[in-house]
Image (cartoon, rainbow, N blue to C red):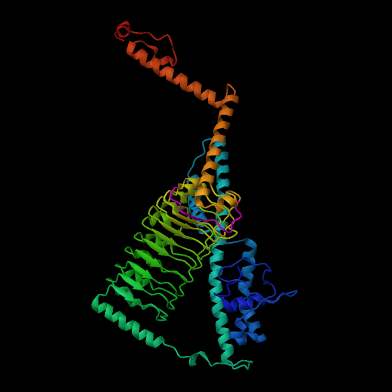
Amino acid sequence: MDPNPKKFPILSYVMAKIPSVSRSQSPEFDIEQPRPTVPSTSEPEPYFELAERMPYLNDPELIASMRAAVADVSRTRSVLKTLGECPDHELIDIARSRLAEIEESLVNQLDEVALSDADAVEVDKRKKAEEMEMQSFKAMISLYEMHQSYEKMLSMAEKRLEKLYEEAKKGGKSVAVDDQGSSSEVPTVEDDVKDEVVAILKDALEKDLERIDLSDRRLPFLPEAFGKLRMLVSLNLSSNQLEVIPDSIAGLESLEELNASSNLLESLPDSIGLLLKLRILDVSSNKLASLPDSICHCRSLVELDASFNKLTYLPTNLGYELVKLKRLSVPLNKLRSLPTSIGEMESLQFLDAHFNELRILPSSIGRLSKLEILNLSGNFSDLTSLPFTIGDLTSLKELDVSNNQIHELPVTLGRLENLAKLNVEENPLVVPPKEVVNEGIEAVKVFLAKRWLDMLVAEEENCKSAEVDQPQGGWLTRSTSWLTTAVAGAAGTVGGYLGGGGGGGGGGNTNTKTDPYLDQQL
């Protein structure tokens, strides 16, 4: 919950100097922000390169002002640390859905008329149970909303601190630094870039261009007027300084390819869901904390690359809607789980989720019948097992689960005939043993297949033993007896019908009358 030093550098620096906010001596491993090595002392002082680049941060008066300005952040952080981590987005969606059902049920109960005291007691019990469940769901949703508000609070606090620092610089306080001049003296190319973009926009409108490449131009923003390019098929905005994409992008009704990688985007507009022809979307290497739920409406998507961001979850309904998706790349994020709906991506062939914080995979992943490449490497201490259903990925050719904490591979992997590459390095594997792994993938598959066969044989023998030891009154005996009786009864009924007798109602009645003529014919 500490502010990320890369995203909130000044805030992180200031909060580290607040006595109540002490940094853990053994922080969790962070791929994007490895801990700097500093000489160990009895009470190590956090090292910040920021103070060298922003020397006014060494001014005690400025630091005191900054600490007072972020007191609310410090208090909120302490509260959230007590309450716990942010719940998964999918759990929140389920909680909201269940909450709506309970509220509807409680409203309906108000219209119920109890016919007896017993009915009234039962209704009251049900009402209390639902109210308790509703309170727990509300608490979970409230915690989630607090975490979301905390993220916004961090952004606002960082901006406040930036203003304080700029005021300190303008105040002219002397500091021991070789100042390179104020920001107003730094040459910029913003005006030149703006003129260039306007010229490109005019040219595109006049010629109905289908492809525009604005990559590597240090664009700070994209003009709203770009939404008027209704004939545009491909737009490349990569490697710029875009912090937002305007809502007007919804006007690009013919757009099929959008590359907004390597920018400073913290969110995508909800209007992106109106790009119904979009086939390829690349938003990698940004600062996205989430993808909008509306992205599920881009049902023509074939490729989605959201790698190297800050994603902690994927939209719950992603799999239900993006059934045409063939490639999904979400490595180098903070994903703790994949949505259950991912199993509905019937066209998915490539799934890369390496370097995340995945703790468990949904069993529905086994329904990805066309999946050929699956990369789950580098989830480190979080991923400890693979689902049994992974053996249902009949088209799988490459599987990488290296650098995790997996102790045992599912025996169902042995039936993946198309699997040609398997990487299980840096796992504390016990099954299969290391010597089998060293022999290669075919040896691993044979070992797992044999282990599975042995398990089936053992289970069959246990079932046979259970049959022998089953008492007369057991369920198996009763089931067999019932079946025999039912067959006999059916035969008696048919026989009685053919013979014109009345033995049909006797079930297993053996005194059914027969027809001499039929006997003679038979």
Evaluate whether residue 262 shows in this view.
yes
Task: From this view, report whether residue 128 is shown above or below residue 489.
Answer: below
- State the image coordinates of residue 342 (x, y, percent, origin top left): 44, 54
- Which residues fall within the magenta stretch? 417-429
The residue lying at 53 percent from left, 66 percent from top is 148
How would you classify the magenta stretch by its main secondary structure? Answer: loop
Pick the quarter of the image with the N terminus.
Answer: bottom right
Image quadrant where residue 268 sits: bottom left
How many marks can you see? 0
Among all residues in the image, which is located at the extreme left? 207
| Residue 422 among those drawn in magenta | yes
Q: Position of residue 265 (x, y in %)?
A: 45, 73
Q: Nearer the viewer, residue 201 or 21?
A: 201
Residue most extreme to the front: 439
Instruction: Please report the residue visible at 40 percent of the width from the left and 73 percent of the height from the top.
Output: 245
Up the image or down, 329 lies above or below 102; here it is: below
The residue sitting at 70% across, 75% down in the picture is 19
Q: 433 left or right of 279?
A: right
Q: Is 87 on the left-hand or right-hand side of 207?
A: right
Q: Quadrant of the C terminus?
A: top left
Residue 320, given in percent of the width and then of the height, sits at: 40, 54
Q: Please identify the quarter of the rendering in which residue 44 is found.
A: bottom right
Q: Position of residue 504 (x, y in %)?
A: 39, 15
Residue 457 in the magenta stretch? The answer is no
